[in-house]
Image (cartoon, rainbow, N blue to C red):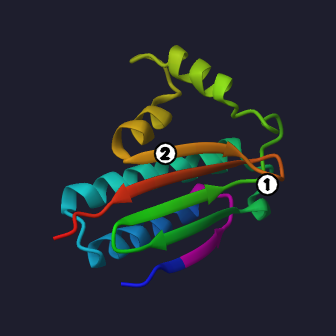
Amino acid sequence: MEKACFELKVPSDVFYLESVRAFIGKLSETLRFSKKRIADIQLVLDEICSNAVYHGSKCVSCGIHLQISVNTQALEIVVSDKGGVNTHNWLSPERLAEIQAKRSPTGESGHGLYLIDCLADIQKFQLNMVGGTDVTAIFYRDVE
């Protein structure tokens, strides 16, 4: 299989995330990921996209951008936002460590980042050139 790439631009509104989940679920099924792994992939994507909408978008029209790459070994998803009102360049390594340290079972936030860390084979958080965040999640395929 050659490398295949998909790009999606989605309005910054949680209303549209169900369609993104459905797309990635069907793609993962086509790639023969197990049902459990498909659920993991969908949950990670949902968390990344939700964070991009809530924290990384100033308005609905800003949108979030998804780049999805597939090859014989992995499914790679990159979600990019443009930064929110008070979040320009806010997701530094220090800030990520602070969010993780403050996460608690009774707290309301920080759990999505923990889930991404637990469920993706590789995850990366990077500031992008427009002041937002690029979040990459990689899921390795079981090659038989």
Write down the region rendered in magenta: 6-14
Element at label 2? strand
Is residue 111 in the magenta section? no
Depth check: give the residue in front, 92 or 56: 92
* Quadrant for the N terminus in the image: bottom left
Q: Position of residue 113 (x, y in %)?
A: 49, 35
Is residue 12 in the magenta section? yes
Q: Amino acid at mark 2?
A: Gln
Element at label 1? loop
Depth check: give the residue in front, 108 or 122: 122
In the figure, 30 relative to 74: above or below? below
Q: Position of residue 56 (x, y in %)?
A: 71, 46
Q: Amino acid at mark 1?
A: Cys
Q: Which residue is mark 1?
A: 59
- The 10 Å Cα crowd at callout 1, few under 14, some 14 to 19, many 20 or more, is some
Q: Report if the CB atoms under discs 2 and 1 are less than 8 Å apart.
A: no
- Residue 84 located left or right of residue 92: right
Residue at the spot 49% in from the left edge and 67% down from the top edge: 20
Q: Which residue is mark 2?
A: 123
In the figure, 3 relative to 10: above or below? below
